[in-house]
Image (cartoon, helix red, strand yellow):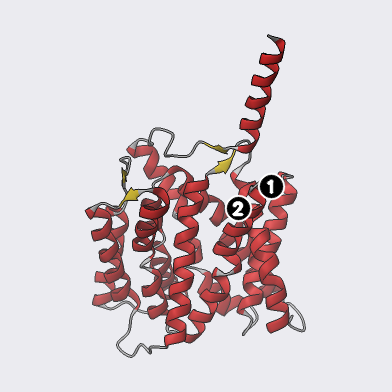
Amino acid sequence: MATNRSSTTQRTVRSSTSSPAPGPADAPPPSAKAAAGIAALAAIGPATWGTTYVTTTELLPPDRPLLAAALRALPAGLILLALTRRLPSGDWWWKAAVLGILNFGAFFPLLFFGAYRLPGGVASTISAVMPLLVAGFGIGVLKVRPTGRTLAAGLVGVAGVALLVLRGTAAIDLAGIVAMLTATTLMALAVVLSKRWGRPEGVSLLALTGWQLTAGGLVLAPIALTAEGLPDHFTGANLAGYAYLGIIGTALAYALWFRGIERLPASSVSFLGLTNPVVATLAGLLLLGQTLTVWQLGGLVLVLASVLLGQSHRRPRRA
């Protein structure tokens, strides 16, 4: 009897230390009120990302986008590792590396490459297809079929972002389009894989975020130093900009974003990303003296309608 109890205890311990925490697929979906609160917090992530352009142009050294990406990811990741004092174990070493590369190490360079070769409106419109990509990946990875409402909301979102940010003189660059579409695809895949893998039991969201930021930052740092190098000196404005992007726009923003992925349907979270071009447009309006046309106002309404339409509190259908 003692041997049996010992074997059972060992199996229980192994199970509790190696398996991921139950995700939303294993737990009852949150109430509409709770889901709205989770979505509101998760939306802070892409909302702060919408201020990246203004912060970069007004506070950071010019012509060093990869350095900005590396200094967003690596210091924030190391700070979170120091605060949580938790390293990955088992297969979470490679899972954290994969997610870190998808979310940061590969995503950031492709994003900046596309942003430099495309007008902001074209880049934002391409990134607006993420909800549709998440729906497609969800069929194969999560075995979840998108609803007609999700697909309709995705199309409305693309149309709204196009009206919000596109201009009639927008230039088309094939390499930039490919880079931007690839970056958006990688982020959509990261959303679905994060949903699939969940979170290791006993590991906080801050620790999981730190793992990914560190992994992505370690990929970005040598690329940035080789391609761009460091400026001769950093001004106080530079340091303030990097601190804002690293602490608010990355560590806090991604922790809330990952929390939303964990607790809400993947499709619902993906629509929250559409707040990015909305905030970017409003930041330009308020801080850079830009103006809104009637068409842009219509696009703003469509984007907000898409975000609301894309929120679903019912358990998704299995494919």
Front residue of this view, candidates 139 and 289: 139
**Which residue is at a point 59% across and 60% down the rendered structure image?**
250
The front one of 45 and 201 is: 201
**Residue type indicated by callout 2:** Lys
Image coordinates of residue 206 in percent, x first then y, are 62, 47
The earlier-in-sequence mark between 2 and 1 is: 1
User: In the image, is residue 217 above or below residue 117?
Assistant: above
Q: Please say whether residue 243 is visible from this viewpoint.
A: no
Residue 140 lies, in percent from the top left, at 39, 54
Q: Within the image, what quadrant is residue 169 found in? A: bottom left
The residue at 72%/57% (across/down) is: 78
Instruction: Tell me if I can see residue 51 in this picture.
Output: yes
Using residue 192 as the reference point, say whether residue 96 is left or right of it.
Answer: right
Q: Residue furthest right?
A: 232
SS label for mark 1? loop
Q: Quadrant location of residue 286?
A: bottom left
Residue at the top extreme, as displayed: 1
Q: Above or below — where is 220 with respect to 113? A: above
Q: Residue 95 carries which label?
A: 2
Q: Position of residue 70 (x, y in %)?
A: 66, 70
**Which residue shows up at 62% across the image and 31% down it?**
16
Secondary structure at numbered mark 2: helix
On the rendered structure, is 275 left or right of 110? left
- Disc 2 to disc 1, how far (Cα)? 9 Å
Res 300 label: none
Q: Are marks 2 and 1 in contact (CB under 8 Å)?
A: yes
Residue that badge 1 annotates: 88
Q: Quadrant of the N terminus?
A: top right
